[in-house]
């Protein structure tokens, strides 16, 4: 129920009541997305999660039948013309999350909260801000700011207590907001402080209330197995092709104890490779036909079929 809307409706002119009722309905739909996400994660089989970075990649993931997706910061930065090195503001990231929420019809998505964009209080605002635009889950990590992609170059992390405070603040924001938003707590400590420290941080993140832990960039199958044995709860495996972590089949990850197999750059890398090939062919006057979708299928992907059906519902005689 929506008691605040009942109060408002009693003294609201009729033309404006529909707007309030529409807002109530939208709030109910948004609240259902974290519940859908939790239902997916509670399934015994691993969830394969291709990551998206804009409206069309979000549509493609849903169209292909996947049950969840993740808004990758690397991809969002790339789509805006930057490296994933802490160059984007929270406002830009939130804007991309809003776009993705609008593009998706039925599947939930995680938003990349990076370092929380400041101290623990900023982390709370980041989580609330993502929830307000439709994210079903948020990831917070322990890198220093400016952060960078977990598989590129030298990284540094904040002290353990500060990292735990970030996660605790994110979980407090989840609980205060209501609706069951899912919090992923990520550590990059393996690269700079060692595997034992990374394990300890994951355990402490769970104690602080994190729903999912994410030990970034384990460098061997042995480390992946040890992490799954040592840390309880839902766990995310980051399957970055060409990165530092062994890329394993989802069935193997499931057997280890992982809950989510994330593919952060598969769509970006595949589309970039195809775009480079298309540009090279155009440059030498060669055909690109074998690289392209039929035009009708492209129009369907971007929403023309749906738009035309909606337009026909409201067509008037001229």
Image: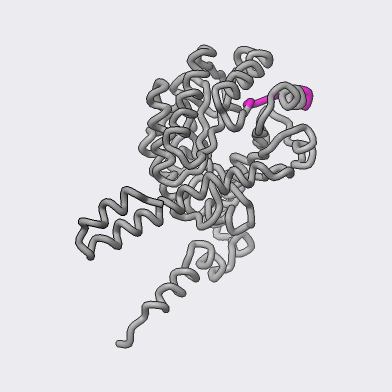
Residue shown at the point (53%, 51%) measured from the top left:
58
Residue 68 appears in the rendering: yes
Residue 214 sits in quarter:
top right
Depicted 67 relative to depicted 155: above or below: below
- The location of residue 155, given as percent across then percent down, is 55, 19
Q: Main secondary structure of the magenta part?
A: loop
**44 relative position to 293: left or right:** right
Residue 287 appears in the rendering: no
| Region rendered in magenta | 215-222
Residue shown at the point (30%, 56%) measured from the top left:
20
Depicted 66 relative to depicted 177: above or below: below
- The location of residue 17, given as percent across then percent down, is 27, 61
- The location of residue 222, given as percent across then percent down, is 78, 23
**296 relative position to 235: left or right:** left
Depicted 303 relative to depicted 245: above or below: below
Depicted 148 relative to depicted 196: above or below: below
Residue shown at the point (51%, 40%) measured from the top left:
180
Residue 172 falls inside the magenta stretch:
no
Question: Which residue is the extreme one toward the bottom?
Answer: 318
- The location of residue 308, given as percent across then percent down, is 44, 74
Q: Front-most of 24 and 225?
A: 24
Picture quarter with the C terminus: bottom left
Q: Front-most of 221 and 229?
A: 229
């Amino acid at each position: 129920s929506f008691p605040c809307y009942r109060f408002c409706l009693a003294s609201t002119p009729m033309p404006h009541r529909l707007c309030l009722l529409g807002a109530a309905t939208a709030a109910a739909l948004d609240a259902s997305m974290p519940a859908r996400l939790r239902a997916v994660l509670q399934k015994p089989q691993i969830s394969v999660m291709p990551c998206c970075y804009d409206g069309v990649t979000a549509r493609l993931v849903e169209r292909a039948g996947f049950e969840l997706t993740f808004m990758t910061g690397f991809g969002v930065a790339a789509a805006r013309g930057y490296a994933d090195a802490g160059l984007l503001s929270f406002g830009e990231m939130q804007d991309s999350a809003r776009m993705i929420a609008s593009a998706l019809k039925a599947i939930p998505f995680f938003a990349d909260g990076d370092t929380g964009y400041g101290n623990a209080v900023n982390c709370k605002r980041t989580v609330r801000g993502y929830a307000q635009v439709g994210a079903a889950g948020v990831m917070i990590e322990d890198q220093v700011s400016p952060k960078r992609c977990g598989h590129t170059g030298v990284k540094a992390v904040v002290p353990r207590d500060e990292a735990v405070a970030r996660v605790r603040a994110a979980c407090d924001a989840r609980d205060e907001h209501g609706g069951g938003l899912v919090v992923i707590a990520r550590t990059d400590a393996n690269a700079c402080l060692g595997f034992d420290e990374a394990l300890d941080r994951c355990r402490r993140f769970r104690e602080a209330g994190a729903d999912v832990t994410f030990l970034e960039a384990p460098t061997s199958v042995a480390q992946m197995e040890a992490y799954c044995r040592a840390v309880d709860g839902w766990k995310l495996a980051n399957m970055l092709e060409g990165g530092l972590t062994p890329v394993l089949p989802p069935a193997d990850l499931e057997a280890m104890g992982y809950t989510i197999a994330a593919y952060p750059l598969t769509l970006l890398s595949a589309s970039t490779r195809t775009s480079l090939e298309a540009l090279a062919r155009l440059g030498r006057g060669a055909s690109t036909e074998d690289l392209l979708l039929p035009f009708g299928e492209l129009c369907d992907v971007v929403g023309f079929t749906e738009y035309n059906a909606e337009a026909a519902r409201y067509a008037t005689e001229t």
